[in-house]
Image (spheres, grey):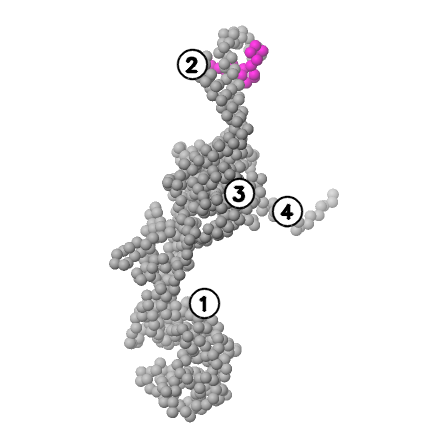
Amino acid sequence: MKEKKIQFTKALEERYLAYALSTITHRALPDVRDGLKPVHRRLLFAMSQLKLGSGTGFKKSARIVGDVIGKYHPHGDQSVYDALVRLAQNFSTRYLLINGQGNFGNIDGDNAAAMRYTEAKLTSTAELMLADIDEETVDFIKTYDGTENEPMVLPCAFPNLIANGSSGIAVGMATNIPPHNIFEISKALIKLLKNPNTPLSQLMKIIPGPDFPTGGEIIDSNVSIKEAYSKGKGSLRLRAKWHEESLGRGQYQIVITEIPYQVNKSRIIEKISELIDNKKINYLENIQDESAEDIRIVLLPKTRNIEAKIIIEDICKVSDLETKFSINMNAINSKFEPKLFNLKEILNSFISHRFEILKRRSKYRLVHTENRIEILKGFLIVYKNLDRIIKIIRGSNEPEKKLIKAFRFTKRQVEAVLAMRLRQLKKLEEKDIKLEYQNLTNYRKELNLILKSKIKQTSILNEEFNNIAERYNNSSINGKRRTIINNEFKAVEYSIDEFDSKEPVSIICSQNGWIKAIKGHQEDYSNVKYKDGDKSKFIIKCKNNDKLLLFSSLGKFYTINCSKIITGRGFGEPVSVIVDKSDNEEVVELSVYNENENYLIASASGRGFIVNTSDLIASTRSGKKIMNLKQGDKSISCCKVIGDYIGVISGDKKSLKFLTYDLSEIPQMQKGRGITLQKIKIGKTFYAFTYKKEDGIIFMNKNKKTIPFNDIKPWLGKRAQAGKIQPKNLLNRLLDK
């Protein structure tokens, strides 16, 4: 027998496609008709089979999960229990389908108790979804082991998909449908039922956007929301809801009462606390969680000078108090195919489903009504011919045949007649049967009218949708809209400077690169503590809202916000914690950033240029490369341009040479290697600085001595010359700050 050759790639594609479709249709995506994935559908059906209605007692969740995995869903018990828990969480599901008793988790992310400790039953909403399931309204299929039957879809008198939403990830496909307000949905269904050609724009006047169980505020434009609903794909900005509470004397606190959907409350608090502790935000004193049943997160500002709306605007940028909700309305259609739906298509799919359910229910009831009428006709014949029928039954071994021949009974009628009890022969019973017969005859006419008339069907569905709207009206707890839609939202414009209290601080940076802040300015800093073997290098008096420029030996400028520098009496922290400075990178200069100032920077190879502070601000922790260096070279000097002359000291330590010349010979550049400042034969450049002609060279030490310009003239020359032996101890005196 010849072996059939199979192309590997083709076989792999076929099998992967089969797997992908199986995942999409049987696990990850909801059915557009009932809005349920198979696991949720099986959960609700299993609970209905266990008679766990809203008016009954609870049963252990473990019992429910056991029935589900034993009969319908051959997967792990934990995944089934997780699905059950979600349907019982009021912060996850907009309209609860399961009523849970016990610990079912919370919005802080705490897990539910084990299934052996919790109990559950169906809610009245879930009962709506299961209504009429025993009247052949939906098709049933065999379960995985062929021993039970399960519904392919639920009758679903409740528009679950659009009301509760759904989320899931399949192979190459995902869904994320937000929940909506059922009162608004009902009104939209009524309008669409009345006029199927109703445009999406009119439907969106009724359903303006999602309605999340946790509330919050949607701050997107109407255009953006409409685009997402028309395409079935898009995103919405969702923000926490807050208000300001006065504490008297101008003080206030910010209270957050609602947070974005699917956001963990405790993580929000942890994130903001971390930002406060790390001095990333300096406008908050503290954050407190005062939540009980309702959410209450309290933000305590440091100062009353900053408006609450500005604080909220900024903190939304660095925390999950504002999130983006991605809309992706993928679902399985009635042909069991994945499809991207828009809002109108989802509503129409539900209406079509309810039409189908109504017709199937009516057919079922018509059959059973006609069967009962048939039996009642037989009973009425009995009452008219009672004596004769009794005589036939008593005098015959096979009364069925004789009764059928004598009175033309059907098989069903004769079986019912022979099964009659003597008590049914009383006069009162005859009246009840006549009345029942009349009522069922009228009911049959009504059922036939329903099946024949689309107008009648529409009228029934219209009443059904009105009942839902009345049940979940906008004044009820469940029907009232929770999420505010703010199409006119405009972000508050503010400057980062508004957050700064502008308090005086002293920035201490050590020789080994440890940095810290001390509150206030001092005359004497001798009491500042350093690690063993370390000492002071920079002491900068500034304010806590200032920015610092750090120039490194690798030619980089880093920007440091003073507010982010750790405050205290300890040793501080390495500069590398604040910026991404490497271990072999030395701090050359640290100074306060001021707009439109010039700095002279120089390298050990004797090259340098002037750079403006506008080109030095780094937007990231990695800094900004300004001076290009050859291998083995490094930056050694950075000083503020304060005059019209430049001085350069180069050579070796035994023979240092000094050169001074007009500063106009030095170009201003944004970045680069620079030009030669001083010719070097032996050694390197140690220092470059600027000074005013009228002041001469000033030594900023305790004595504040100067060298007048007339005394400097012997060293006056041109750029790139070698210079002459420096004045006595010039370099040491310049660096003794």
Decide which of tag 2 and tag 3 comes sooner along the chain. Answer: 3
How far apart marks 3 and 1 lie (CA) works out to 47 Å
Instruction: Looking at the picture, tell me which residue is in the foreground, 499 or 574.
Output: 499
Decide which of tag 4 and tag 1 comes sooner along the chain. Answer: 4
Instruction: Please determine whether, in this image, residue 525 is positioned above or below residue 357.
Output: below
SS of the residue under disc 4: helix
Which residue has dot 1 on it? Answer: 619
Circle 1 Cα neighbour tier, 10 Å, few/some/many (<14 / 14–19 / ≥20): few
How far apart marks 2 and 1 lie (CA) works out to 94 Å
Quarter of image, res 207: top left
Residue placed at 37% from the left, 40% from the top?
Answer: 475
The main secondary structure of the magenta stretch is helix
SS of the residue under disc 2: helix
Which residue has dot 2 on it? Answer: 428
- Label 3 or label 1, whichever lies nearer to me, is 3
The kind of residue tagged 3 is: Glu
Q: Which residues are magenta?
A: 404-422
Decide which of tag 2 and tag 1 comes sooner along the chain. Answer: 2
SS of the residue under disc 1: loop
Quarter of image, res 580: bottom left
Circle 4 Cα neighbour tier, 10 Å, few/some/many (<14 / 14–19 / ≥20): few
Q: Is residue 621 visible?
A: yes
Which residue has dot 4 on it? Answer: 14
- Label 2 or label 3, whichever lies nearer to me, is 3
The kind of residue tagged 2 is: Leu
Decide which of tag 2 and tag 4 comes sooner along the chain. Answer: 4
How far apart marks 2 and 3 lie (CA) works out to 55 Å
